[in-house]
Each structure stands twice: as structure tokens, then as C-alpha cells.
Image (cartoon, grey):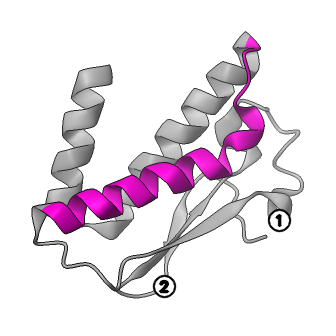
Amino acid sequence: MNTSINRSLISFGRGLVLVLAAGSALGAGGAGIAHAADAPSVAVTYQDLDLARPADARVLYTRLEHASRAVCADYNTIELTRRAAYERCYSKALSDAVRQVNAPQVLALYQAATAQHG
């Protein structure tokens, strides 16, 4: 799988981003960093969307939420320390993805969602 030392995503031009996970963002200390190449990743396409349209921005935001959950799924348990790692992983993946897409409508959705939870 594609990876990064820190949770991030890589843009592959207009219409595709790759959401990545890595050990350092998961609270795993240095243990997860040594093999960052094993971190999960999810490609998110949006070539079919017009991000100036609120409905399409919402579709992309939902895709980014799903991708963020997917790359952090291994940490989604009821065990408190792993659950906290999942929450950090998910939050970082989603914020990085929204920032990378760089679309005002998607950013507004993210800010509204984080204001409700924050």
C-alpha cells in the first residue's frame, strides 16, 4: 500500500486524492513509523463532481469521511487507548484530505461538522 511517515494525502491532479495512514499519527510512538510502507491508503476520486455545487461538495465530503474511516479501521475498537488512536487517526486523515482538495464548499462542510463535534 502507499504510505507516508505522517498521516497525509497525496493529490494526483484534479479529481483524485489518496488518503493515507501512518503509525505516528496513531499514537503508536516510533513503533509504527519504521514500516510506514505498510500503512493503509484509499484513493478518492471526484472527477465526476462539480465542487462549486453544494450537493457535489457534500458527495465528496462523504467520500472523504468514508476513506478516513477505512484507513483508520484497524484502530476502531472499544478499547479506550485504541479508540483514542482511531479518533486521532480519523480526524487527521479527514482534515488533511479536506485541505488537499482545497475546495471552499468542502471546507465549509468540514468546518460545520467539526464545530458540532468540537
**Is 61 on the left-hand or right-hand side of 81?**
left
Along the horizontal axis of the image, is 69 left or right of 108?
A: right
Q: Give the residues drawn in magenta, as a range.
A: 55-79
**Where is the N terminus found, in terms of image quarters?**
bottom right
As drawn, which residue projects farthest toward the left?
Answer: 53
- Does the magenta portion include 110? no
Q: Percent x, y for residue 64?
A: 44, 57
Choose top left, top right, bottom left or bottom right for residue 77: top right
Q: Residue at x 67, y 21 (%)?
A: 83
Instruction: Residue 42: name its quadrant.
Output: bottom right
Q: Which mark is residue 46?
A: none
User: Which mark is drawn over residue 12?
Assistant: 2
**Quadrant for the C terminus in the image:** top left
In the image, is residue 102 above or below residue 93? below
- For marks 1 and 2, the one nearer the N-term is 2
Is residue 118 shown to the viewer in this render?
A: no
Q: Is residue 90 above or below residue 47?
A: above
Task: Judge the density around disc 2: few (<14), some (14-19), many (≥20) Cα neighbours within 10 Å.
Answer: few
Q: Amino acid at mark 2?
A: Phe
Q: Nearer the viewer, residue 60 or 111?
A: 60
Image position, residue 109 (x, y; %): 21, 47
